[in-house]
Image (cartoon, grey):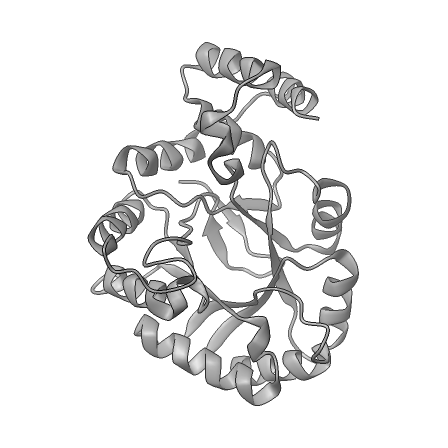
Amino acid sequence: MQFRHLGRTHESIPVVGLGTWGIGGEMGPDSSQDRAGIEALGLGLDLEMKFIDTAEMYGAGHTEEVVARVLEGRRDRVFVASKVSPRHFAYDDVLAAAKRSLKRLGLKQMDLYQLHWPNPRIPISETMKAMEKLVGDGLIRHIGVSNFSVEQMKEAQHSLSREKIVSNQVEFSLIYRSVEAGILQYCQKAGLTMIAYSPLGQGKIPRGKGSSFKVLDEIAGNLGKSRNQVALSWVLQHDSVVAIPKAVATDHVKENAEVAEWKLDREDYQRLAKAFS
């Protein structure tokens, strides 16, 4: 497994981690597939994908409980991230939400706590004051944001008095590239990690058809890799990017882990960028 620095910290995280949206439910809890989710996440950890990202919103908290079961007996060296929902951005609500997440995760401290989406109804200064309180109290180690624009990232950082924002988690894939021109460039310049969610286009890349996908299949065939592996490797071409694909099938988990062991050459990267422009 390859590792990259988290922001400008001395922390290193895997370039391919484990997303959890849909494991344990979506907007409500669903325990019917818990066993499959636990097996998939456990396999990912065995394959050194020791970065699990979740959120209090996922499965209305149940996903964090599933993650807790995966972490039993193997918390050491696993980087655990969760996210606070926008409705909890008021100062006291942030503190309470973090403590609830820690309880569900079975942890005393989270490695990364992220603001899930912007909430213009609550001053960001109030929210970030609470995030710094959590760091000061030892309940979280690092502060991140998710789905924030460049201006929102700047405002959030300006609202912090001691800590630094280390990451922005956004959707990024071959077929969803709106973050390239602004957010990605800013993260590279400012020394933030961009955490790519849905790096396989919310399942569209495995099923896609057309001329763009013919180029993808040609490159995959030449490399002896799957379509998904090539698409994921394309996302990871930038040194400031890590990805958190969600996979429940064990063969998909293995495929994702293998991507960290090789890299697209510049020509193939550019061909894909042009084909999906």
* Above/below status of 272 relative to 139: above
Q: Position of residue 88 (x, y in %)?
A: 56, 79
Q: Nearer the viewer, residue 109 or 219?
A: 219
* Above/below status of 76 relative to 44: below
Name which residue lies at 65% across and 17% down.
Answer: 271
Q: Quadrant of residue 145?
A: bottom right
Q: Quadrant of the C terminus?
A: top right
Q: Position of residue 183 (x, y in %)?
A: 72, 50
* Above/below status of 187 relative to 216: below
Name which residue lies at 75% across and 51% down.
Answer: 186
Q: Seen in the image, is 162 located left or right of residue 109?
A: right
Q: Quadrant of the N terminus?
A: top left
Q: Nearer the viewer, residue 206 or 132?
A: 206
* Above/below status of 4 relative to 108: above
Asked whether residue 138 appears in the rendered view, the answer is: no
Name which residue lies at 52% across and 14% down.
Answer: 219
Q: Nearer the viewer, residue 32 or 135?
A: 32
Asked whether residue 2 appears in the rendered view, the answer is: yes
> Which residue is farthest bottom?
92
Name which residue lies at 48% across and 44% down.
Answer: 15
Q: Position of residue 207 (x, y in %)?
A: 46, 26
